[in-house]
Image: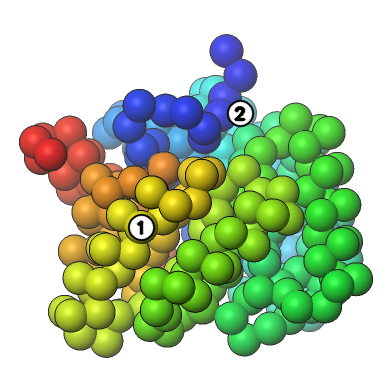
Amino acid sequence: MKATFLNHEKPLMTVILQCETPEVAIGRIRNALHCGGEAFGLQVESLLREYQKEEIYCKIFKEMQGRPIYVTNYRKHQNFGKTDEELAEGFLGLADCGATLVDVMGDLYDPQPDEVAIDGAAIQKQMELIDKLHSKGAEVLMSSHVLKYTPAERVLEIALEHKRRGADISKIVTAAENMEQQIENLRITNLLKKELGIPFLFLSGGESSIHRRLGMKLGCCMHLCVYEHDVRSTFPQPLLSVSKAIRDDMGF
């Protein structure tokens, strides 16, 4: 059966890998498989440039033993200075190596503060890239890292735009400055479930511990977690061991 991030009964425990070398990534993969990791997310921008090669990606993917593979290739970290055209070529190469789900930034070809492109020509290029990725058998997630508290109407607007551009999954990352905003983000998660019509991943930073852990119970199609925390991991991402307990043992 072909790996997929779509149409699962439960959100997949997706172990994020932010590693500079393939050896560290492979060690994390083996440990996470032993602890019940169901999918993996390789953040290519964390790999040292010398390891950003298709033969390395294939080597890392092989260790995942057929689990669904989510990949990012953001502008930051080791990718600083690359053009968006170079990043797009990287997406296509990752699809050729067997990536299941490719993260196309919502402002690819037109950088914007909220990561939502507004230039018509850039949007058309995004849609053409998504078509190419689909033709290679990859699923596409479109992401917008807004990174600030965002009202429900705007979150839904961004998600619907991701859908219009051809994304299979919409990913939006906002923030919460206090508990009231975090509770509102939980409500927005439920709103996306009712209104969007495609799978989604809605996350937040700041005051986000509850939202990060319970979003998967309210409709998020996947759950980003880590096997362990280190200086390169995203601290709000919960541990795999904690996340599985929340998903499988909380009875709602």
x and y percentages locating residue 116 in the rendered image: 66, 74
Of mark 2 and mark 1, the one earlier in the sequence is 2
Marker count (numbered): 2
> Is 219 rendered above or below residue 80?
above
> Is 45 rendered above or below residue 63?
below
Number of the front mark, 2 or 1: 1
Q: Who is closer to the viewer here, 229 or 152? A: 152
x and y percentages locating residue 144 in the rendered image: 57, 69
Horizontally, residue 47 falls left or right of residue 165, namely left
- Badge 2: residue crowd in 10 Å (few <14, some 14–19, many ≥20): some
Under circle 2, the secondary element is: helix
| Disc 2: which residue | 62
Q: Who is closer to the viewer here, 39 or 210? A: 210
| Disc 1: which residue | 191
Q: Quadrant of the C terminus?
A: top left
Kindly indicate the quadrant of the structure image that contains residue 35: top left
Q: Residue at x 34, y 64 (%)?
A: 188
Q: Residue furthest top?
A: 1
Find out whether the residues at labels 2 and 1 contact each other: C-beta distance under 8 Å. Answer: no
Distance of label 2 from label 1 (alpha carbons):
37 Å
x and y percentages locating residue 86 in the rendered image: 86, 64
Q: Residue at x 56, y 47 (%)?
A: 169
Residue 221 badge:
none
Mark 1: amino acid: Leu
